[in-house]
Amino acid sequence: MTDKPIVLLEQAKKSFGDAIVLKDISLSVSQGEVVGIIGPSGGGKSTLLRCMTLLETLDSGRLAYGDLIVAENDAAGRAAYASKAVQREAKMRFGLVFQNFNLFPHYTVLKNITDAPLHVQKRPKDEVFEHARALLGKMGLAGTEDKVPCELSGGMQQRVAIARALCLNPEVLFFDEPTSALDPELTKDVLNVIRDLAAEHMTMVIVTHEMSFARDVADRVIFMDGGVIVEEGTAADLINNPRHERTRAFLANYE
Ligand code: ADP
Ligand code: MG
């Protein structure tokens, strides 16, 4: 791990109508770091990831991918976004894996994985197909390339979604509760794939309800509640020795 931030979010604020969902959140993710985000439902975890991945806009704050400044406050203190071209470039630097896989149902596995590398990144066909097949092998999905998503289990579909994100060569991968829609026996395969990526020092931000997984895999764990980071620390510290009452009360549900 190095100190070079891959993604930096500063003083992020976001409201939906009267509801303040993110209240002054700052988060920096270093190269090779695995950050786990835990916390009760409605705490703002998905909104945080959606703001970091440009699916939502910040009301105020600063967002940068390396030297690319995506959003920065203007004189009035409102987040002003960079040009579409800069945003497109920033979007090439991360991958995103959702709870519900979000594969294209009518595309084969191979087409799901190779579509964006071929048509958005405009990489050579041979290289992209080779990369995609290597990723399928690594995810334990060899032989599935001509299937369509509904022919696969949820756990396999989620591993296709991870392969699809990885085939874009992202600098950082974001996961929003990647196993919440899966049965326990399918969850394990998906978590093991993410564990392998962590062992290879893939930079990742993972929202999860799997506490033992977060403790094992994350270098740093953040507990979010009510739109704020209540506390953060090493995985062992935060999960085994939470300092705040809100964190303790939340973790008590998982004992
Ligand atoms: P979490 O992922 O921690 O469960 P979310 O970020 O999904 O939390 O939601 C935080 C709060 O923001 C919730 O009260 C939710 O209802 C609200 N919220 C999220 N997205 C929207 C939206 N697009 N419009 C209105 N309210 C939203
Ligand atoms: Mg959520």
Image (tube, rainbow, N blue to C red):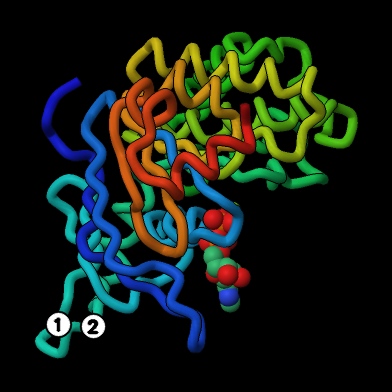
Judge whether 188 appears above or below 248 on screen.
above
Is residue 133 visible to the viewer in this orientation of the structure? Answer: no
**Tally of numbered discs:** 2
> Is 67 situated left or right of 130 in this image?
left
Q: Give the class, few, some or many, for how many residues have Cα within 10 Å of label 1's Cα (few <14, many ≥20).
A: few
The x and y percentages for residue 2 are: 14, 24
Foreground: 233 or 147? Answer: 233
Q: Which residue is mark 1?
A: 74
Q: Quadrant of the C terminus?
A: top right
Judge whether 170 appears above or below 240 on screen.
below
The x and y percentages for residue 111 are: 68, 35
Q: Quadrant of the N terminus?
A: top left
Q: Amino acid at mark 2?
A: Arg
Q: Which residue is mark 2?
A: 78
- Residue 50 disc label: none
Marks 2 and 1 close (CB-CB < 8 Å)? yes
- Ligand 1 quadrant assignment: bottom right
The x and y percentages for residue 236 are: 37, 20
Judge whether 81 appears above or below 67 on screen.
below
Q: Amino acid at mark 1?
A: Asp
